[in-house]
Image (cartoon, rainbow, N blue to C red):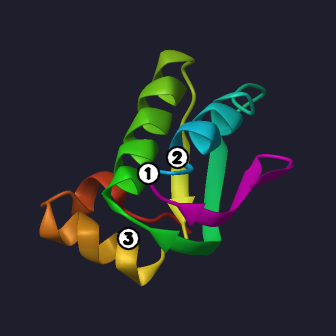
Amino acid sequence: MIERDGNLLRVRGALTIASVTAVCEAGKQQFGGGDLVVDLAAVTEVDSTALSLLFEWRRAARGKNLQIAFRNLPESLKSLAELYGLTELVAEKA
């Protein structure tokens, strides 16, 4: 589900209500050792809980004085963020 390469976390698979709790915890275990970039290019499916995941990771990172950025958000996740008026909160970083 999550692979770490330096400060890059690659997330793959579904980010839905069925998987988001496990993915969230697995991701938070990777926090530490510097700022992170989360690459979502290999995410295959999302629902609104995927937005909650990104916000939880952002809160957890802030609690450890880390910066976290997201890139390669799936179009479906961008659409959900737009629908809920949260586009700026999940803005992608290069």
Q: Secondary structure at mark 2?
A: helix
Look at the numbered discs 2 and 1 and tell me whether their residues touch, using CB distance below 8 Å. Answer: yes
Q: CA distance from mark 3 to mark 1?
A: 14 Å
Disc 1 designates what residue?
17
How would you rate the neighbour count of disc 1 (Cα within 10 Å): few for under 14, some for 14-19, many for 20 or more? few
Q: Whole-percent x and y of residue 60?
A: 50, 25
Check the picture and name the quadrant holding the C terminus. Answer: bottom right
Disc 3 designates what residue?
77
Magenta stretch contains residue 10 = yes
Q: Residue lying farthest bottom? A: 75
| 25 with respect to 73 (left or right) | right
Number of numbered markers: 3
Which residue: 36% across, 44% down? 52
Disc 2 designates what residue?
20
Q: Which residues are magenta?
A: 1-16
Q: Secondary structure at mark 3?
A: helix
The mark closer to the camera, 3 or 1, is: 1
| 4 with respect to 89 (left or right) | right
Question: Residue 29, relative to residue 69: is it above or below?
Answer: above
Magenta stretch contains residue 3 = yes
Check the picture and name the quadrant holding the N terminus. Answer: bottom right
Q: Amino acid at mark 3?
A: Leu
Q: Amino acid at mark 1?
A: Ile
